[in-house]
Image: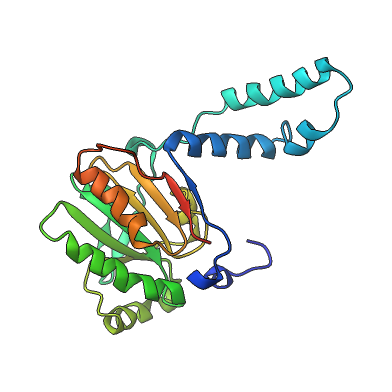
């Protein structure tokens, strides 16, 4: 983001000024459609709010917006459409999230220089322990640059984190998964590898438990939020 470092975007819970949740995947997809439509300069709130000269003009604006929305495919959540980058364990072994299919996976992106990340990791570790014996895995993936990766083991040791920890991610990786470009960021994958929930910012306990429990219960009851913003 121009003018701001990624480190500058790493913010604490008490500094959060807004929290927005999309109630389902369809609403999230519609949000993405309209954002992309606005980027094509064919639809905007300003254009729609300006007094039109006639009913015909208003209809043309509306038709143009709807036509563009229909022409853009919804952002897919299915596993077959998701990226599957190669990460590395701390000793350099290649790893892919697709290798974990068959279980629920909670993926947290973090960095050694991120204060809220270091507050969040122990909390996620405690949540992970509560699912011991169940088909749920937690993976922590660092977005540290290569020059800082030597710090990862000592930070994890200080925080008493013993869960699987990978590296070799970056802010582009976050964008590929629809998580923006700020850490911490978390996503929950179902057994087929599809994203069920995304959390931008420091996840609250309920942000993680709700989608995991929903999946453990066979997707019965109300679906969790597809996207939750905590910054």
Q: Is residue 107 left or right of residue 38?
A: left
Nearer-the-camera pick, 190 or 27: 27
In percent of width and height, residue 177 lies at 43, 49
Classify residue 48 by image quadrant. Answer: top right
Q: Residue furthest right?
A: 53
Q: In which quarter of the image is residue 217?
A: top left
Residue at 86 percent of width and 18 percent of height: 54
Q: Is residue 83 above or below residue 185?
A: above
Q: In this view, does 55 lie above or below 78?
A: above
Residue 96 appears in the rendering: no
Left or right: 126 in relation to 12:
left
Give the position of the N terminus as an image quadrant: bottom right
| One can see residue 46 in this view | yes
Colour scheme shown: rainbow
Q: Which residue lies furthest to the front in this view?
A: 221
121, 207: nearer the viewer: 207
* Residue at (39, 38) in percent of width and height: 77
The spot of residue 145 in percent (x, y) is: 46, 71
Q: Residue at x 43, y 37 (%)?
A: 25
Q: In this view, does 80 lie to the left or right of 99?
A: right
Q: How many labels does the image show?
A: 0
Q: Where is residue 50 in the image (x, y as percent from the top left)?
A: 83, 33
Q: In which quarter of the image is residue 134?
A: bottom left
Q: Which of 157 and 228 is in front in this view?
A: 228
Name the outermost residue toward the left: 133
The percent position of residue 124, horizontal first and vertical second, equals 30, 66
- Where is 114 relative to 180, above or below? below
Q: Residue at x 55, y 71 (%)?
A: 15
């Amino acid at each position: 983001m121009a003018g701001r470092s990624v480190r500058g975007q790493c913010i604490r819970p008490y500094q959060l000024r807004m929290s927005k949740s999309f109630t389902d995947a369809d609403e999230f997809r519609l949000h993405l459609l309209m954002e992309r439509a606005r980027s094509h300069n064919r639809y905007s709130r300003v254009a729609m709010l300006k007094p039109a000269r006639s009913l015909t003009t208003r209809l043309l604006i509306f038709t143009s917006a709807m036509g563009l929305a229909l022409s853009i495919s919804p952002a897919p959540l299915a596993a077959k459409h998701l990226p599957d980058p190669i990460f590395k364990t701390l000793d350099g072994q290649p790893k892919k999230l697709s290798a974990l299919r068959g279980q629920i996976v909670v993926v947290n992106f973090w960095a050694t220089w991120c204060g809220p990340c270091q507050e969040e990791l122990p909390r996620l570790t405690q949540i992970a322990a509560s699912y011991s014996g169940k088909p749920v895995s937690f993976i922590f993936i660092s977005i540290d640059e290569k020059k800082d990766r030597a710090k990862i083991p000592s930070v994890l040791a200080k925080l008493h984190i013993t869960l699987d920890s990978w590296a070799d991610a970056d802010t582009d990786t976050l964008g590929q998964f629809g998580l923006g470009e700020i850490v911490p960021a978390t996503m929950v994958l179902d057994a087929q590898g599809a994203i069920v929930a995304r959390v931008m910012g420091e996840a609250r306990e309920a942000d993680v438990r709700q989608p995991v429990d929903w999946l453990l219960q066979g997707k019965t009851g109300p679906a969790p939020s597809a996207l939750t913003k905590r910054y």
